[in-house]
Amino acid sequence: MPAPFQTSRRVEFRDTDAAGIMHFASIMGLMEEAEHEFLRHIELPLFLAAEGGKISWPRVSAKCDFQSPARFEDVIDIQVAVQRIGTKSVTYHFALSCEQRPIATGTMTAACCFVGNDGIRPVPVPEDVVEKLAPYQQDPS
């Protein structure tokens, strides 16, 4: 089983509040950026072509627990693991740290949806997507 996918980002000035502490919304953005980088790493496009439309992954749940502040210029290490592959959704687990000091942990669940001219509807996660994600499925505890 592969280790969780890892990437890092520097806290930019735009990510902080007046005290120089990273704003909670910016941490959620880092989680999404890390998810997208993970998907590129496993060669899984964010939008999949489908007959008459495309498969997309809107968020249906997002949660983050904060342990300590991140500040301007800190380098945040982000681990991404697949927590759960459901019938019509995928849940990712994120662990953010700075110099091994925990910053936050979180989860995001994305629904597998078909987007076409007649709207958007949930659909089963395609088997080829399951095959690419399954090796990264881990118990985050």
Image: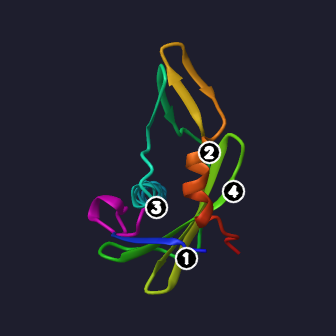
**Which label's residue is closer to the chain start, 2 or 3?**
3
Q: Please state, as top left, top right, bottom left or bottom right, where the N terminus lies in the image.
A: bottom right
Residue bearing mark 2: 127
**x 44%, y 44%: residue:** 46
Which element is circle 1 on?
loop
Residue 54: where, in percent of width, then height? 47, 29
Q: CA distance from mark 4 to mark 1?
A: 16 Å
Q: CA distance from mark 1 to mark 3?
A: 22 Å
Q: Is 36 left or right of 61, judged from the image as shown?
A: left
Residue bearing mark 1: 3
Q: Which mark is residue 63?
A: none
**Which label's residue is closer to the chain start, 3 or 4?**
3
Q: In the rendered view, tell whether residue 38 sits above or below residue 113.
A: below
Residue 130: where, in percent of width, then height? 61, 51
The answer to whether the residues at label 3 and label 4 have Cβ atoms under 8 Å apart is no
**Which label's residue is closer to the chain start, 1 or 3?**
1
Q: Residues within 10 Å of mark 1 (few under 14, many from 20)?
A: few
Determine if residue 38 is in view: yes
What is the magenta range? 11-23
Residue 93: where, in percent of width, then height? 60, 63
| Nearest to viewer (mark 3 / mark 4) | 4
Q: Nearer the viewer, residue 138 or 7?
A: 138
Residue 124: where, in percent of width, then height? 66, 36
Which element is circle 3 on?
helix
The answer to whether the residues at label 4 and label 2 have Cβ atoms under 8 Å apart is no
**Which label's residue is closer to the chain start, 4 or 2?**
4
Q: Amino acid at mark 2?
A: Glu
| Nearest to viewer (mark 2 / mark 3) | 2
